[in-house]
Structure formats: structure tokens, C-alpha cells
Image (cartoon, grey):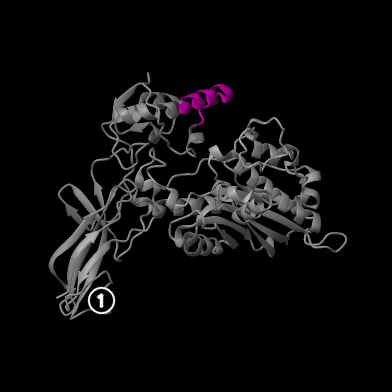
Amino acid sequence: MLTVLRLHLPSDIPIVGCELSPYVLIRHPDKSVSTDDVPESFPIEGYFLRYKWYRVESDKKVAICSIHPSEQATLQCIGCVKAKIPVAKSYHCTPKCFSDAWQHHRVLHERAASAVKETGDEEEDMYGRFNNATSGVNNNSNASVQAVANGTSQLHPAAVTQRNGGETWVEVGRSKTYTPTADDIGHVLTFECNVVASETNSSVGHANTIVTSRVIPAPLPSPRKLISVTNADVTGRLNSSSGTFTVLSYNVLCESNATSDLYGYCPSWALSWSYRRQNLLREIVDYHADIVCLQEVQSDHYREFFEPELDKHGYQGLFKRKTAEAYNGSDQTIDGCATFFRRERFSHVKKYEVEFNKAAQSLTDAVVANAQKKTALNRLVKDNVALIVVLEAKFGNQGVDTLGKRQLVCVANTHVNVHNDLKDVKLWQVHTLLKGLEKIAASADIPMLVSGDFNSIPGSAPHALLAMGKVDPVHPDLVVDPLGILRPATKLTHTLPLV
């Protein structure tokens, strides 16, 4: 007889838009164990599996912690209530949760007070777009809190199909997988699997059931400011209103780097790729950018997720994987840079790939003594790459200029993730990329767009080189240069009109 051996759900907190798929172990009549589905249309020895999903509703309303959405709230900040901040942001699960989050939480109070002062009106909705976040600093606060007796989480009415004690079970699905909806937010889900006899269409034995954690809403992205570049010297022929376009650059954090060791302040379920990918996609798509430059895109994620999903929204993609001389993981988990563009706005003309490891090899061959080559390569070889794409504009009257030439734009996308103790290598990589872009710009008189994650802050040497075209010879970042790759400092310049 067909037997269900084990049911298991991922430990991730289920969210809206995140597909849930239980791991069902099945023993077949031949004693083999499999995870294959056994549908009613293809029974085994007269038996098949029947799946049901239920939303568990209770007569008791439950408030959810604003910081830990999988936890029930026990405290409410009175300051939030008085400031008319959205009530959902006032709930916390424990006194420690509230204390840890206070450094962030008090900003909500300050902004609410500022909004009232400036407009004379409470801006209740202005905080709805901000993500909840926790602070790693444990501060005591003077804000008043009260115990939460009953929250304000809405219970969504639906047809009652089953009642267990004080709980109402509402059937929401009949397949092995289920994607929670907005109606499921705040509720737990129950998955039920039965072995059913085809002849009688009745269950055999006891049903196997598992219960998920509470369904939480997908987070809203932090608001981001669109930066306009209108300088005619920079944008040239693309400066007219019919020729403007938008660009988004985003480090999406590859799964292999999303570890609790690196991000200890973040719960493990929120680091999981199954949780993050739909939220990332939602945010990227919502901006409707004409060009999208992504960094830390894992190879298999590009192939299996980003490329097919963004294709549905009219984007064409190109990808450059990092080199693997310094990487010892799986080929599938090597990340790289991906550049997407909307087909209705641009067409692909040419692609260049920059591998800084190859540049490092050429550099050491030319300027480093044989005895020091191994040491030099150990310092310079970091697997970083850049993807350079030449696109042709297809919008407005920008496709062809007055001389009949095509309007092209060159887009560079890179990720310079060298550690801060290797500032010479970081600056060398940026300088190497810019010198290559100079050659392309000179050969085709083409506008340049340089994007990426440079892991550099304003005032650093890489930022100065990018934004101002040169680095001050006495810049403190030039002090450490054991290989002499930054000398003379006067060579650290470029002529691209970047802003």
C-alpha cells in the first residue's frame, strides 16, 4: 500500500508571494522511497495522495510584533499612539525587543513630530513605506509601553469549512504547493495529506498534517531617491525630454554570502533565498528602470530566476560570472554582474568583459620581479570582474542623430568587493576599469555610464577618482602600496566626464 512516511516544511517563515512546498516522503508498493507526487489521475496500486491547505482562524485577534513579525506582540508603545504613527509599528514582542529597537524606533517619533511642526497635520501614511528594522545597540528608553490585550490585526471572513475547538479552518488550496495570499496574513496554515483509495474515494488511515508559522506580509522596500542628471555636457544628445532614461543599480546579496555569521542581526528565515528573491524582484520591477545593473547575482539564480522573471517584464539580460582562481566553492554559486535593459528602449550592440585577474597577471609580468610574483598575485587576484555593454537607443528621436549615426550608450557594471585592508587593490581595480572605458569612449565617441558596488565611501580614493577624475597625491589611501602599483600618483586620472 502507498504510505506517507514524513511531511516537512522549510523552516522559513511563510510570506505572501513565497511558495510553500512540503517535503513528502512516500513509500511505494515495491518498498522504494520517493518524493514523487501520486495524483488521482495516476494512482499506484489503486491509491493516490490528496492534499489540502487550511487557513486557521481564531475568534481572538492577535497583534504582531513590528520587529519580529513571526512573534505575537505583548507590548505597545504609547508614544506611537499619541504621535498617530501607524499602529502596526507600535507593537513589540518583548521588553528587550523594544529596547533593542529603540534607536531606530525613536526616529519614527522624531519624524512624526517634525511633520506636525512643518505641516500642522499628522502625516500618518508617510511611515507606511519604511521597513521595520532593529538596532544592534541595546538602549534603555523613556518611552511608555503598555501590555497588548488585543491587537488590531484584521480577521478576513471566509466560508467556514471545518472547526476545531475554538479555531475555524478555512480550506484555501488542494495542491501540493501553496502560495499564501493577503487573506492569510496573521494566520497559521495547516497542510494535510491523505492516502486515498481510488475505488471508494475515501481516506485510508490517519491524515498526516503539519502546521506552518504565522504568515507575514512581504516587506515594503525602503524609499529611494531618484537622482536626476541633466548637465548637457554629460548627457549630450540624450538630454532632451524624449531621450531621458532611468538606471537602477542594486547589490542583491548572493545566497552564499547571506549567512548568519555575516548578518547576525537578521533572522535566518529573512536571509533565505526563497524569502528574499520575490521581494527583490518586486522592488526591481516596481521602479520600471530602463537599465538595471545588478551585482552579487549567483550564477544559478541568474539562469533560473532573474533572467526568466525579468524577461516576463520586457527585459533582456547579459551576465558575467566572476573568475574562480581565488574561489573554492561550487561553480553554480559563483556570483557575478548582470545587466538588464528594456527591449522597447534599447537594443544590444556589443559586450566587453573585464577580468581583473587577467589584468593582475599582465601587471605582475610587466613590473614585478620573478621572486615577488607569487606574493603580488596573492594580493591582486580577487576574482572581481566588470561587464561592459554597448546599447543603442530606440526611443524618441534619439535612435539616429542629425548625421545619421546611431545613438549609442556604454554601460559598465562592476562589483569591487576587495577588503578595506587592500585599499591599493581596490583603487587599482577602479583605475583599470576606467582606463579601459576611456579607450572605448575615444574609439566611438560614446557616452559612458559607470555603475556598480565599489564598496567605497565619499572621500575615499576610488570615489575621488570616479567623481573628480583624479586622486590627490597625498591622499591617505595611497600610503599602503607594497607592490608600487599606484605610483606615480599622478597617473591616477581619467578623462571621462563622470558626475
Quarter of image, res 100: top left
Extreme-right residue of the structure: 403
Residues 29 and 322: in front is 322
Asked whether residue 452 appears in the rendered view, the answer is: yes
Residues 214 and 126: in front is 214
Q: Residue at x 28, y 48 (%)?
A: 213
Label 1 neighbourhood size at 10 Å, few (<14), some (14-19), many (20+)? Answer: some
Q: Secondary structure at mark 1?
A: loop
178 with respect to 285 (left or right): left
Q: Where residue 407 sits: x, y (%)?
A: 78, 59
Q: Residue at x 76, y 50 (%)?
A: 241
User: Which quadrant of the rendered structure holds the N terminus?
Assistant: bottom left
Report the residue marked by disc 1. 40
Q: What amino acid does circle 1 point to?
A: Glu
Magenta extent: 107-123
Q: Main secondary structure of the magenta part?
A: helix
Q: Where residue 359 sits: x, y (%)?
A: 64, 54
Report the label total: 1
Q: Where residue 140 sits: x, y (%)?
A: 36, 21
Q: Residue at x 76, y 46 (%)?
A: 496
Residues 269 and 281: in front is 269
487 with respect to 374 (left or right): right
43 drawn magenta: no
363 with respect to 310 (left or right): right
